[in-house]
Every structure is written in structure tokens, then in C-alpha cells.
Image (cartoon, rainbow, N blue to C red):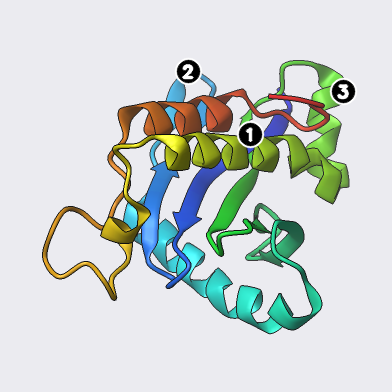
Amino acid sequence: MSRSPSVACIGVIGRNNNPLHIALFPATGQGHEQHRDKLEYSFMLNSCLDIFEARMPSKTVGHDFGLLHALDERIAMYGWLTNTGVKLVIVVDMEGRTAPTPEAGKTAILGLRNSDLAPAFQALQTAYIRLLRNPFYVPDEHDPKLHKGRGSLQITSPRFINEVDRIGKAWLPGMTAI
């Protein structure tokens, strides 16, 4: 039975490098789910921040940063920067799920192209824009510099959280839209 890439984690990181939302997706297949450690993935997301900063002068905002780094042959992190300075990170597990078709299993061997994740990043950016358009959502409440003890630093919107979960579960290499 061949394996196919899947999203292991989606991180939404604020412009001040504070985590706004972290969604984990279990590895699936062979009749069981392998759950992921939130602390481990928080460290992985944090390790991407230096790469964003190093590439910032040469990249414009609202842009695909591509592969940030690969931890090993199985786990790789890809990034996107919104025009508000929010960073979106998708951690891909190259063997995260049972391949739906034999052809899909070949992607784990060949690797991903940056364009494979573009639909997921575009869908995440759209979900974030919808969140910003909500009159009851105040982005400054999630800014640690302006927080002053009120509210939560995490995004708590059920609609946004559900959309992130949908994107993470629906993504497959080669998709053109999510």
C-alpha cells in the first residue's frame, strides 16, 4: 500500500511572530490515526520565523515563500506571507496518508512542487480575509504588544477554525483549487 503527502500542520503566525492558530492533522491509513504532538509542531513553526526574516528583503508581501526547510525526507515546511504581515505555514508529511490512487503514491517519492501548495495557501488567505472582514473580529486583540490582558492571543472564530480544518483535510498534491 503506497503513501501520499498530506498536511500535518497549518500555522497562522501574527505579524509580531505570535501564533494565532495551530491546526494539527493526524497521519492516517492502515486502520489507525497517528496523532501529532502540538509542542513539537509549535517548535517547527517557530523555527520558520528566521527563514521568513532572512528572505523578507527580497520578497514582497502577499507572496509564496515556497519551501522554507525540510526537516528530513518526510517532513517539509512551506510558507506564505500575507499583505498584513501574517505568516501562513503548511507542514507537509510526505507519507501522511494512504494514497487514493497508485499514481498519487508516486508524489511521496518524487516530491512536491511549490505550485502544489498554492491552492491551499490561497484558500487559507481567503479564509483569513473573511475573518478580517468580520466586524466583530479585532486583529489588534491578538497583538501581544497591544493585548494588555484582554481577550485571547489565539484566533477563536469557529468559522475560521473550521475552514482551516477543511483545507488541511481536503488538500492533495496536484489540486488546482480547494
Q: Which mark is residue 103?
A: 3
The residues tagged by marks 2 and 3 sit, at their Cα atoms, a distance apart of 21 Å
Q: Which mark is residue 31?
A: 2
The residue at the point 77 percent across, 32 percent down is 173
16 to the left or right of 149:
right
In which quadrant is the N terminus drawn?
top right
164 to the left or right of 107:
left
Residue 141 position by quadrant = bottom left
Q: Residue under label 1, please give it.
A: 123
Extreme left residue here?
149
Residue 138: percent from the left, percent from the top? 32, 49
The one nearer the camera, 49 or 77, is: 49
Which badge, 2 or 1, comes first in the chain's sequence? 2
The residue at the point 42 percent across, 68 percent down is 43
The residues tagged by marks 3 and 1 sit, at their Cα atoms, a distance apart of 25 Å
Frontmost of labels 2 and 1 is: 1
